[in-house]
Image: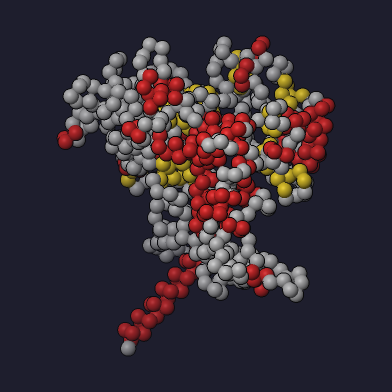
Amino acid sequence: MKNKSLISGLIILSLFILSCSSSQRGPKSGKKAASSKTGWAYNDRDWGGFEVNLKYKGFQPPIQGMVFIEGGTFTMGQTEENIMLDGTSTKPRPVTVSSFWMDRSEITNVEYREYTDWMKLVFAGAGQPGEAERDDQYYILYENSLPDTTVWRSKFSYNEPLVEMYFRHPAYNNYPVVGISWEQAMAYSKWRTDRVNERRLCEELGIDMEKYKIEGGGLNDPETYFTTERYLNDPDYNLGEYVIRKKKDDAPGKNPKDDLAAQEKKKKDKVKNKKRKVRIEDGILIPDFRLPTEAEWEYAALALIGNSHEDYIKENKVYPWNRHSVRDNVKSNQGEIMANFKLSSGDYMGYGGFHNDIGSLTTPVRSFMSNDFGLYDMAGNVAEWTLDVYRENTGKLDDLNPHRGNNFKQIIYLEGDNIPLKVDDLDETLAKALGYEWDDENGTVQYDIDVGPGDFVLINPYLLNRKYNAQTGQYETLPPDEFNALSELIEKYSNEKSNDYHNANSQRINYNAGDNIGDGDGQTMNVESGGGAYSTEDVFGVYDYGKTSMVNNYARVYKGGSWKDDAYWLSPGTRKFLNQDIGTDFIGFRCVIDHMGFEGSQDSKKPRRKSKVKRK
């Protein structure tokens, strides 16, 4: 009996401890879940209708093929001698990178063709006679999504078959896509975000796909295609009309979202049948796909997690693998090359009969061993775009998630407080004042790689009433016509009170902090010629473009070395740069997505450490 009583007591005590620890980790689940601070019930219409997702099981990648990169501290910068004696590698310094998810390999030709096929379907009438095909204002969006296959063409080399075949022939399906500019890679990332969120919403709500495909997917009207931004911010955009109903009075979809905050205004109101749109709080919509920052890419490539022991690194790396050589030292593969790169002058693949690195140009992804994170081709094959704007000196960046290139912009609301302003709503004067190009033939904003029909107008409110003069290097008052066109926006977003964070109506203290794309280092331009191709943006200084420097706010970092590079460039610490609107035959890309919540690979519900000593 004593043993049974003791066991019962221990069980009760353990359950009590477990309940206490779980309450520290988040709200309890169940029908009677309530706030531990106010006692008010969650998810109860009678108690205000405050909704909390109590069934959330932790962040998981939205698709297969992504690798969890557990964040940590590492020494960022050169891992071997800087033989170039310039900004091709940076001075080593310790930094920390937060956890994220990364594509296991680069985006391949077949994966990128999925994107261009969608663009063709929506903006080019699927190649069939129709409104989109006849209308140049939409067709240009498809045209701008295509890779530049002429990157294979060389004046003194015969690569002509690749110009026509590399991107489309099935033999190259699993090869990394090239000829993609940084801007195209960013556009692909945005498209990928929208398509994944669109699929998740369709599955969650139970969308009638046949009806949605015809009426809501953008096929008949290119301005109706789904974007995450539009779904979250436009109150008039809803997928509710496409949900499946078995009977007239049935609740729509598989998992309809009840609007628990809805209140009865009249006795006849049936608030129990009211539904709402999916929100970020529901945990269904995912963060944006994007390019990795330079720090994230370098951290993932080194994969020091394989060399870590408790709280220190046993051995640093020069390359993504564990030896200080480009050849394997494992007995079964002794002497084999570890990546696809240029071995020496004129030697791209080794001798016939034993092709050491498999191919003379690019090779299929995952042809070589992965690193300790499970990532393939982080050295060689193709170099990869990163998110960062290039500067030789990176020492001024934060030591937590360092990045240069933030370009702060926000959605603006002109008509009322909840209707976003769209690019299609702009007239010529307002469009030009906001920095958009105007299409005189169609009487609309000129669509481009980063501007599509139905997009919201994004601005930096602090730059509305200022304009940079490239000749004087100073900000000046807007010309009268542009000021008048922007007067309503300037009055609403750039008033004096908004800059004073002590004022009740002010913007937040760090409201504009996420804008460092120029940040005192200047932008390349040729002042004598009026600034050259890249002088139209706001800048913070002057580089003499084409004379003393090619560095500008459009120069983006790429890393990893390629089939065209020597072994020196395989080190993750090395870096090069190229203007963001240019594609080459040796640069590809892969995407990352931010990890939400608990950053460790262990179970977030279990305490990390148990106290072994009693503290007074």
Task: Report which quarter residue 272 is drawn in.
Answer: bottom right
Residue 297 visible within the image: no
- Give the percent coordinates (x, y) of residue 536: 66, 23
Residue 439 visible within the image: yes
Give whichever of 507, 447 is nearer the camera: 447
Identity of the residue furthest to the bottom in this view: 1
Task: Report which quarter residue 338 is drawn in.
Answer: top left
Task: Report which quarter residue 470 is drawn in.
Answer: top right
Give whichever of 412, 314 is nearer the camera: 412
Identify the image's colour scheme: rainbow, by chain, secondary structure or one colour: secondary structure
- 235 over 427 or under it: above or below: below
Does residue 229 appear left or right of residue 55 in this picture?
right
Quadrant location of the N terminus in the rendered image: bottom left
Identity of the residue furthest to the front in this view: 129
Residue drawn at point x = 38 percent, y = 28 percent: 166
Residue drawn at point x = 79 percent, y = 28 percent: 482
Residue drawn at point x = 54 percent, y = 73 percent: 31
- 352 over 311 or under it: above or below: above
Residue drawn at point x = 44 percent, y = 24 percent: 149
Give whichever of 456, 382 is nearer the camera: 456
- Give the percent coordinates (x, y) of residue 447: 63, 32
